[in-house]
Image (spheres, coloured by chain):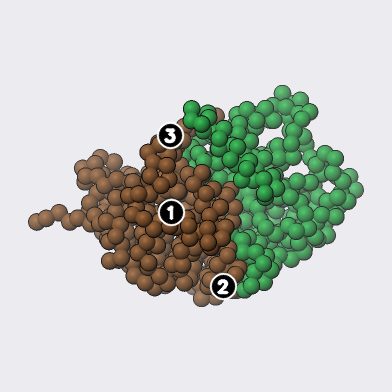
Amino acid sequence: MTQQAEDYTVAELMCVAIAREIEDGDVIVLGSFTPLAYASYILAKITHAPNSTLLAYAAVDFRPFALSFIRAESCATRGAACLWTMLEDLNSVHLKGRGDVEAISSIQADQHGNINLSVVGDYNSPKLRGPGGAGAPEVIKMHRKMLGYFPNHSKMTFVPQVDVITGTRYVIGAEERIKAGYRPGPIRYITGLCVMAKEEKDKPFKIESLHPGVTAEQVMENTGFDLEVPKDIPTTKKPTAEQVRLLREEVDPYGTVQFDFKPGKERLGYLNEILNKELQAIGYD
Amino acid sequence: MTTENKVGKLGDITKIIKDGDKVAIGGSWLGGHPMAIIREIIRSGIKNLTAITVVGSVDIDMLIGAGCLSRLMFSFVSMEAFGLAPNFRRAIEKEGLPYDELTGLAVIIGLEAGGRNVSFLPYRGPFGSDLVKYRPEFYKEIDCPFTGEKLIAAAAIVPDVAIIHGTRADCTGNVQIEGTSGTDLEMMRAAKKRIVSVEEVVSGEEIRREPLKTKVPKFQVDMVIEAPLGAHPCSCAPDYVFDPWHIMKYMQAASSPETFKQYLDEYVMKPEFEYLDAIGGMRQAAVLKRLAREVKYL
């Protein structure tokens, strides 16, 4: 069972790394369908964290399902133990700091734990108008852990200072967090190259592990701020053969997780392929 | 005594929604937006609206592309896997559409304040966020009168009109929502007037058979409109999924103002009863409903 997989993708490696962040009993918050985050949580739920609570859309404690772009919402809704409004969600989970984790991603992220989902360039004359942050800018402070996933580890994403602080972890060190009424926990980013974390306001992000075949130099070259680089950095644990099988055969049979790793131009084509497979599976073509 | 009847036709929305109104739009992500009403707003030529959304998508993008908005309040607008919202981006990056970008929690809590009839509600808000700095009219740092803790006051949001889409309602306006309700309830409590479109208008007896599904009571509703598939191309969970094939068409059309005008001519600037045929008829509706039932749990 613990046999390492011979053949796995970076997406699968990241999934397993995010899943490892989930502890049994965690309250896990999701927004709408983001393949990498959903795959990781559902993998955790069906393996080492069966007592975790999954929340997405209006659905609370929904049963884990096989991933689909189109059906995620109806699967979560039909499999829910309880259906909440967003306000009930806030009042029950977020504002009280009851959430353990909600993996986020961002257009830019900096050395201070700030994220930018708003604007690249000047706020009043943007080069790129991003989608905005929805819950992300505030929940990254409230949940126990701040977990970010960044398939494309580059200087475009990891900048010294984000152009606009849509949101921030704000209180970082354990003592500071407890004083502010939040549970302590790290900022941890799982990227296409490594796992890195920040646990104190005045200390830099530290490379915790390097993905197989990646060097510390490579990570530093692709990061726009200084990192703590320990002498001996462990290699990110490879997925086991069983984890890869579960991801491919059970959790994500249509390969939605690869979506985040496709270049922008190929995404719609890939999505179309998946949609056609899903149609065929229910007898339409 | 006659029973009150709030059932209207789509065309009746102009009795409630006026040029220049602030309109809160229900639904979230690609789910449950009141798209039949959105199309009717465009068809009726209502202008200069301020749209209020928490997590918007095709609803907001379509209103912007059709020139109905003079301002936007949002925390998130995206077409999700399909990409960034094209008209939204163009209007802000190129045409300077004025907007108020708030954190999602501030919009939700602001609406709740509106519903409670107070001017703000405090919470441990987004300290350190630039959005607070850019929009001080929506955020104020205050001291807790009991403990002295620094808190953020989120300003109340009071829309002129709220529009939402639900599963079913009776003719008096008791509304059941079976899927994602997002911030629909908060919008309905906060707004001065409210319109709900539903998949089906049913009897009061049917509503009373499952009262736990009723999310909005009749005194919070001014007009009920029967609009089957009224959230399309968005979903109405758990009855039908969003229509990814239509959304891909939309994305292509919205890539330029010229092609978007063709989209509006083809799908919006016609009577709503022709819409179903335009999007693929009963067969397409059946596919979307079938997909919503095909769930596989692990």
Q: Same chain, marks 1 and 3?
A: yes
The answer to whether residue B15 of the structure is visible from this angle is yes
- Disc 2 is placed on an element classified as loop
Frontmost of labels 1 and 2 is: 1
Residue B102 badge:
none
Q: Which residue is drawn at 61% across and 64% down?
A: A129
Task: Identify the chain of the residue marked 1, using the numbered disc in the image.
Answer: B
Dot 3 corresponds to which residue?
B290
Q: Same chain, marks 1 and 2?
A: yes
- Pointer 2 local density, CA inside 10 Å: few below 14, some 14–19, many at least 20: few
Frontmost of labels 1 and 3 is: 1
Q: How many marks?
A: 3
Position of B143 relative to B57 (above/below): below
Of the chain colours in the picture, the one used for chain B is brown
- Pointer 1 local density, CA inside 10 Å: few below 14, some 14–19, many at least 20: some
Sequence-first tag of 1 and 2? 2
The answer to whether residue A52 of the structure is visible from this angle is no
Dot 2 corresponds to which residue?
B96
* Residue B51 on image: x %, y %: 44, 65
Q: Quadrant of residue A253?
A: top right
- Disc 1 is placed on an element classified as helix
Residue kind at label 1, given as amino acid type: Glu
Dot 1 corresponds to which residue?
B266
Sequence-first tag of 2 and 3? 2
Q: In the picture, which chain is green? A: A
A196 or B251, which lies in front? B251
Q: Residue at x 67, y 58 (%)?
A: A107
